[in-house]
Amino acid sequence: MKCPNCGFEDTRVVDSRPTKLNTAIRRRRQCEKCKFKFTTFEKIESTPLVVVKKNGSNQVFDRNKISRGLVRAAEKRNISQDVLNNIVNEIEEHIRLSSEYEVTTRQIGDMVMKKLADVDEVAYIRFASVYREFSSIDMFLSELQTMSRKNKKKRSQLAKNSMSTFAARKK
Ligand SMILES: [Zn+2]
């Protein structure tokens, strides 16, 4: 990158680190010629992302929608706001880095579920039951089994927690 001080073409990166929210990379550069130091930020391109809904209509990606779903699922669970924010950040970054700026609500939902499964089982089941629209206890149990296979150790505890969560939600 060209030196903003003397215009020399060769500048060297002397330090490189993510910004606080991990949504950009901050680089300290130094001009090889005049030793001038300056900072650049490498950020994700802010082209609007298009989300394709189940009924085929489009809308602009809105990270607040994911946040709201997560906050609901995490209610009264011991999950910090940072952890939830991080999930949303990771998902947004993942979409922006990997797609052609178009993603389906189903893909987003699957990503959220994958991440929640690692964080908190009850929050995962809550999110899954809303997102997958479990209409019967059978659907719910089969989701539970899929998850339990991935995590055999906690199976019995998970089943216990989740059954009471499901029962509470149905009231
Ligand atoms: Zn220079």
Image (tube, grey):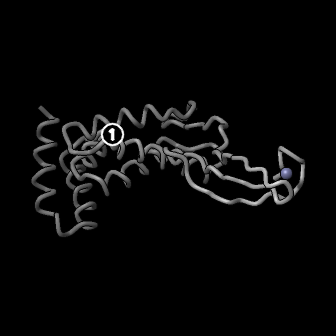
Number of marks in the rendered image? 1
Image coordinates for residue 14, horizontal then vertical, percent = 68, 60
106 vs 158, nearest the viewer: 158
Above or below, 62 relative to 23: above
Q: Quadrant of residue 23 in the image?
A: top right
Residue found at x 70% / y 47% = 40
Residue found at x 63% / y 45% = 44
Q: Quadrant of residue 133 in the image?
A: top left
CA neighbours of label 1 inside 10 A, class few (<14), some (14 to 19), many (20+): few
At label 1, the amino acid type is Gln
Residue 155 as seen in the image, left or right of residue 126: left
Hey, which residue is sitting farthest front in the picture?
Answer: 34
Above or below, 36 relative to 14: above
Residue found at x 60% / y 36% = 50
Q: Is mark 1 within 8 Å of ligand 1?
A: no
Point out the image quarter for the C terminus.
top left
SS of the residue under disc 1: helix
Image coordinates for residue 165, horizontal then vertical, percent = 15, 43
Residue 141 as seen in the image, left or right of residue 17: left
Check disc 1 and report the residue beneath it: 81
Q: Quadrant of residue 13 in the image?
A: bottom right
Residue found at x 67% / y 37% = 47
Image coordinates for residue 9, horizontal then vertical, percent = 88, 55
Image coordinates for residue 115, horizontal then vertical, percent = 37, 53
